[in-house]
C-alpha cells in the first residue's frame, strides 16, 4: 500500500460516518490502533479542520475497556468454535 494509505482510508471512513458520533468514535479508535504516531497527529489535525474533533474528544483514556464496553465483539476463540 502507498504512503499514508491507511490515513486516507480512515479520513474517508470518518467522513462517511460523520452523521453518527458513536460510529466516528469507533472508527477513530480503530484508526489509532493501526496508524503511526505521526499519522495520528495528522488525523487529529484533519479532524479539527473538518469539525469532527468534537465527536471524538470525549474518548475514555483506557482504550481497551472502551472497546469492550462500547463494542462487544465475540472473542476469536468464540468465533472459531461456532
Image: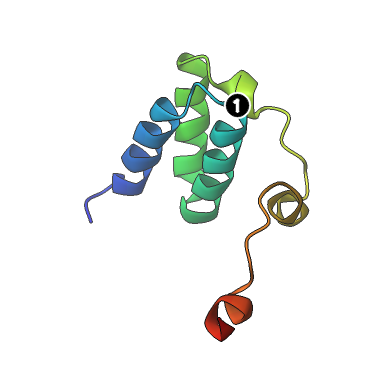
Quadrant (top left/top right/bottom left/bottom right) for the N terminus: bottom left
Image spot of residue 77 (x, y percent) = 61, 81
Classify 60 as above or below 82.
above
Classify 74 as above or below 35.
below
Secondary structure under the numbered disc 1 in the rendered image: helix
Give the left or right position of residue 60, taking residue 30 as reference: right
- Between 36 and 52, the one lying in front of the other is 52
Image spot of residue 68 (x, y percent) = 72, 56
Q: Residue at x 63, y 78 (%)?
A: 78
Q: Residue furthest bottom?
A: 81
Q: Residue at x 54, y 54 (%)?
A: 33
Image spot of residue 10 (x, y percent) = 40, 40
Q: Residue at x 63, y 60 (%)?
A: 73
Colour theme: rainbow
Q: Residue at x 73, y 29 (%)?
A: 58
Q: Where on the picture, by quarter, is residue 22?
A: top right
Give the crowd class for mark 1: few <14, some 14-19, many >=20 residues within 10 Å: some
Give the left or right position of residue 56, taking residue 40 as reference: right
- For disc 1, the marked residue is 21
Q: Residue furthest left?
A: 2
Quadrant (top left/top right/bottom left/bottom right) for the C terminus: bottom right
Give the left or right position of residue 48, taking residue 61 as reference: left
Amino acid at each position: 500500500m502507498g504512503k499514508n494509505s491507511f490515513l486516507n482510508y480512515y479520513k474517508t471512513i470518518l467522513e462517511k460516518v460523520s452523521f453518527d458520533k458513536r460510529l466516528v468514535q469507533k472508527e477513530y479508535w480503530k484508526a489509532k490502533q493501526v496508524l503511526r504516531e505521526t499519522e495520528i497527529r495528522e488525523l487529529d489535525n484533519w479532524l479539527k479542520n473538518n469539525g469532527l474533533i468534537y465527536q471524538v474528544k470525549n474518548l475514555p483514556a483506557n482504550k481497551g475497556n472502551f472497546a469492550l464496553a462500547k463494542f462487544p465483539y465475540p472473542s476469536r476463540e468464540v468465533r472459531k468454535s461456532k
